[in-house]
Image (cartoon, rainbow, N blue to C red):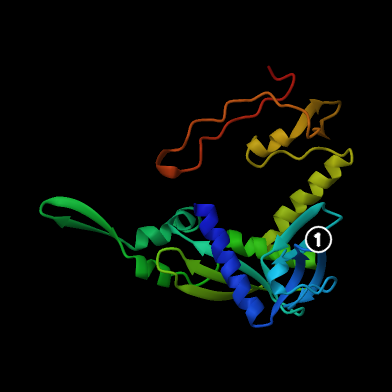
Amino acid sequence: MIYDEGKEIHGKWQKRIWDLGRLAGTFYCRECHYAFPALAPTECEKCHRGRHALTYHEVPLFNQNLNMVGHADGLDGWDGPIIEIKSIGLGTLRFEAPNLIAEHTYKLNINGKPRSFLDYDGLWDSIRRPFPSHMRQGDFYCYMSRKYREVLFLYECKWNQRCKELIVRYQEDRIADRLDMCSRITMALQGGPVPKCPFDGCADCQRYEEKHVNPGRVLVRRSPAASATPEPQGNAGENGQRPASRRLHRSGDR
């Protein structure tokens, strides 16, 4: 249900921008199965079916050198900026800005019993800029686009449906360390040294098979059809926190 709500919010804003004649990107016709780039089309450019037959497939982005792909939620005309739509709930804030929740939580004593109250309106008003992970996502999109230098974030609050429009300019410095890691991984896939996992072993590493070689290690892509032996997933975190970390074992370590 949470996923459905976020998807509904994305579709609602994309439709509004489309209605304004400013939504650019890839559109797909469900009648003739044809995809085409366009700016707020009113019909399929191949079979000429009306807008009711069209689905917005957002803005595809890629960087071949670093094996990176992604898709932005929208594009405000062909000149940009890139549009990112975010539905903001308490779960988002617990992960992105727990300090804001703490600042707007008030402890009272009612009839001798301690109670905590959260100022929801004040919490929403305190969001003045996009969260760091969202800004890094926008920076990656600008980097892959090789053209756009601004990202327009549309934040919609899940508990009161209020919205914010926040514009951020591209800064490569915010993602420089991650671009460096992407470059290291790309070189590893071509036979170079394998970089150390920044999390000291994580679930994402299961997508690859690791083997010892002399010297160092190499990554080998696992076939999609290959079945992996299930491993313990770690204990669930308390109070909705991230599950306890676990160390992945490599062949020969046991």
Residue type for callout 1 = His
| Residue 149, position as x, y percentages in the image | 73, 74
Q: Is residue 148 left or right of residue 240?
A: right
Label 1: how many residues lie within 10 Å, few (<14), some (14-19) or many (20+)?
A: few
* Residue at figure coordinates x 76%, y 34% from the top left: 208
SS at badge 1: loop
- Is 126 on the left or on the right of 10, as rendered? left
| Foreground pick, 11 / 130 | 11
Q: Which residue corresponds to mark 1?
A: 33
Q: Residue at x 45, y 73 (%)?
A: 162
Horizontal placement of 65 versus 101: left or right? right
Res 131 visible: no
Q: Nearer the viewer, residue 81 or 48?
A: 48
Identify the residue shown where x is 50% and y is 53%: 2
Q: Residue furthest left?
A: 111
Q: Position of residue 4 (x, y in %)?
A: 54, 55
Task: Give the image location of residue 79, x and y in percent.
Answer: 76, 80
Provide residue 190's location: percent of width, then percent of height.
Answer: 89, 41
Q: Name the residue at the top extreme.
A: 254
